[in-house]
Amino acid sequence: MVLGSVAAVPSILISVSDGLWSIAVVDCVALLWLAFIRRRRESPFRWRARNFICLLYLLGLALLLKVGPAAQIYLMAGPVMTALLLGLRSALFALALNAATLLGVGYYANADIHLPGFAGAPLLEWIVITINFAFVNALMTVSSAVLLHKLEISLQKQSAITVSLAEGHERLRESEALYRATFENAPVGVSHLDLDGRWLAVNDELCEITGYSRDEMLSLRYGDIAEPEDVEADAPAMAALLRGDIPSLNREQRYIRKDGAPVWVHRRTSLVRNAAGDPKHLVVVATDITERVRYEVELEYQATHDALTGLANRNLLNDRLEQALAGASRHGRNVAVLFLDLDNFKIINDSLGHGVGDELIKSVGERLAGCVRDMDTVARAGGDEFVLILADAESENEVATAMSRILEVVAGLYQVARHELHVTCSIGASLFPRDGADPETLLKNADAAMYRAKEGGRNRCKFYQEEMNARLGQRLSLAAKLRHALERDELLLHYQPQVDLRSGAIVGAEALIRWRHPELGLVPPSQFIPIAEETGLIVPIGEWVLHAACVQAQSWAAMGLPRIRVAVNISARQFRHKGLLESIQQALRLSGIPPGYLEVEITESMIMYGPEETIRLLRNLKDLGLQIALDDFGTGFSSLSYLKRFPIDVLKIDQSFVRGIVSDREDAAIVKTVIGLAHSLELRTIAEGVETAEQAGLLRGWASDEVQGYHFSRPLDADAFIGRLREGRRFVIDG
């Protein structure tokens, strides 16, 4: 309106002063029309645009009538504005109207405008002018329409880009918000580190793990909270990660909290690279595994230490003794095994109670632990019995001196629960290699020597004595006979049923070797198996057992009997023999037994011999489809971390634990813990040596999968075992 006034008011004044009243009237009408359009600014755009174009047409017509052909330029503005405001179709109508208007004005005015070559023909002049006008006006209108169309396309593209950018920014903002929420609320410690180990970003969980605030963490380096030993051990792997040799680094390590306490974490480190592929920073995810490690350490401690005294138990004793014997064998040294028993302890226990007896046992254990070297071992064998291993004993005289010192340390006055107790002990000793080559023999001989010391008056020590040549002659004779046992068909197998505790059905059988000699009769495995191990005969004997057991199991299935697993023990020497895998493949092929029904049993000590080689061999066995059982679990001293890595299907709980689960809380706790551990690792459990219904009931209540033992059946020969399968008997187990 203001612009219209600025343009119209001077025009009106000039027209009035020049007497151009018609122009003045038109300007006044235009001014009023503009005011009318403005007042109707809420009306649709196309209505206001049409009114504005009509106003332009009126002004152009008025000027054309007053001024003549020179005013046609004002008419040209109409189609151009129509194209811009209403589109090309409406502009074509405006062009036609302009041409008709110009031609009509020229026809009715009949004015000669003196165009060269058209003198005396005013109508023809106006036709030429109209054609020229229409061409120029059409060109301007179309150009304006094309320009407007391109402008609209450009604006649409710009709008689409703007919308896309806005959506991209919104997605980026949402992604950043999601990442930030994930980073901050993750249930594990998440952090970013630069390549120098400085913390760039940490979440609350990592601060909770380390005990530092966020600001404190950002001022530290990785090495400030990591255990130095772990940092040093990780250096080669970190270098490999930065080189791109490995995609990520997984470690279980220790962080040092702000309060100085260690915390175990599982740390996964990944490398982030920039667009050029160069290392940029590290992303570290840390999970607090302190409780799990504590549980594993506690479980391992329970499995290897006496609950009352904290001394080594039978498991750790056997392991330490095996290690001592192996070292002594390599270096040609002696090892002394001392078996110690308190004199008249039963009288103290019965008269003063088990509480006083337990306190006395603890006190004796403390004295024993304080009177030996760090390299020696003190173990509680059970009750009031202790075993000491004196490694690298120089001579019998040195051992005698040590025993005299131990007698003096143990003997004396004990203050226990307001009671003054005078205690003495008896000690028996055996020497490696003179009195035995294996832990069992040495312990047995030391035990026998201890009883002879008691018979001699107590509070004394005695060495084991036996003619070595006589014992060696017996072993050599037995070894010679054993060499002919295979070729003379003197070996046979017995089978002990393995019973499912849920159904009571026989689901497997353990193949146990027997030797029936024509002169010696039935020779116990404990006598000839160690000789077979020492002489190497265990390898061909083991192959025979493997083939015979597979053939027998397949023959049972061919008779229509229920198909069951057959378990075969693999000796340590056979396990390390290069032909084991080929021997098993041959047994499967010749017998036709499905691989899933053959179970090989190995012991803890065997898998600890070269763990990496063991893993490869076990995986090869698993690839055949076999079941793998870890026999006598709990009697060795293997690492639980290895147990997770080995492809094992079954844990067999040793009978030494099962035997005492009814009366011994320690044995019960160990068995329950082992069953829970096995199930957490998705392994089956078989409890060995079940001899009573009460033991079977407890094991079923603790969710053990299978059992075997004399309560269900002694080992049977093949014919008797067939009869047991044909009966189809299901054992009833209460629990």
Image (cartoon, rainbow, N blue to C red):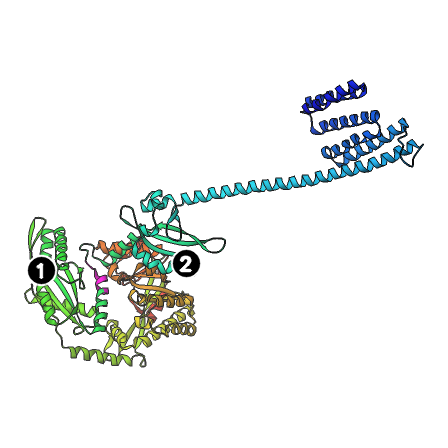
Residue drawn 76% across the image and 27% down it = 56
Along the horizontal axis of the image, is 121 left or right of 658?
right
Residue in the foreground of this view, choosing between 312 and 524 = 312
Q: From this viewpoint, is residue 679 visible?
A: no
User: What amino acid is labelled 1 in the image?
Assistant: Val
Instruction: Verify whether residue 105 appears in magenta.
Output: no
Q: Secondary structure at mark 1?
A: helix
Residue at image mark 1: 409
User: What amino acid is labelled 2 in the image?
Assistant: Leu
**Residue 722 horizontal/vertical position (percent):** 36, 68
- Height in image: 224 above or below 538? above
Q: How many marks?
A: 2
Indicate which disc residue 241 carries.
2
Residue in the foreground of this view, choosing between 591 and 534 = 534
**Residue 351 horizontal/vertical position (percent):** 9, 52
- Position of the N terminus by quadrant: top right
Q: Which residues are magenta?
A: 311-319
Mark positioned earlier in the residue sequence (1 or 2): 2
